[in-house]
Image (cartoon, rainbow, N blue to C red):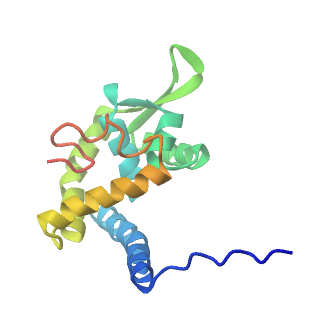
Amino acid sequence: MEEADEPRWLSSDEREAWLTLVGVMMKLPAALDAQLQRDAGLSHFEYMVLAGLSEAPGRTRRMSDLAGFTESGLPRLSQVVSRLEKRGWVRRSPDPTDGRITLAALTDEGLAKIVSTAPGHVEAVRSLVFDPLTKAQSRQLGSIGKRILSVLDPDDYGLRSADVGERRGAPIGNA
């Protein structure tokens, strides 16, 4: 029987970088969620659902596309959209061209909520992520993130999609 190949262990520098990234992945979502809960009564996930709809043509997306955008399963997304519907911020309807497909649309009230919430969220993102970095480091962060995402999401289905955040003042964070 052949001996198994030795695992490709991380070097000490790689281990340090990895543990730092893990810390960011664990702490940043909680910090963003806390700001949104405190200031707007929204979870970060709810905010991303509203933002994803606000960025879509006609402020409408297929539920399956919205699930891909938010990196969630349809059952979780459906529960959240139900809560957002009860608040009057989202409306679901069958696709007129294919009744098997459900569309989610941002209402005018939902747009007003995302527009009023975005400045505080963007300030939190700025203070937590970009203010501690130099401009060069911010560019490096973007470049590094794109390289990692190209492995995780080779079809570019998620947040980097062309229709997201391209216009000025977008709730995702463009200014």
How many numbered marks, from 0 up? Answer: 0
Please indicate whether residue 75 sits to the left or right of residue 133 in the image.
Answer: right
At a point 15% along the width and 40% down the height, the residue shown is 168
Q: Residue 69: x percent and y percent? A: 44, 43
Q: Is residue 41 visible?
A: no
- Considering every residue shown, the one lying at the far front of the view is 2
At a point 16% along the width and 43% down the height, the residue shown is 169
Query: Can you tell which quarter of the image residue 101 is in?
Result: top right
In the foreground, 134 or 109:
134
Q: Residue 117: x percent and y percent? A: 24, 52
Above or below for 157 versus 72:
above
At a point 37% along the width and 55% down the height, the residue shown is 147
Please indicate whether residue 41 sits to the left or right of residue 64 in the image.
Answer: left
At a point 14% along the width and 48% down the height, the residue shown is 175
In the foreground, 146 or 43:
146
Query: Can you tell which quarter of the image residue 137 is in?
Result: bottom left
Q: Residue 57: x percent and y percent? A: 32, 27
Q: Is residue 141 visible?
A: yes
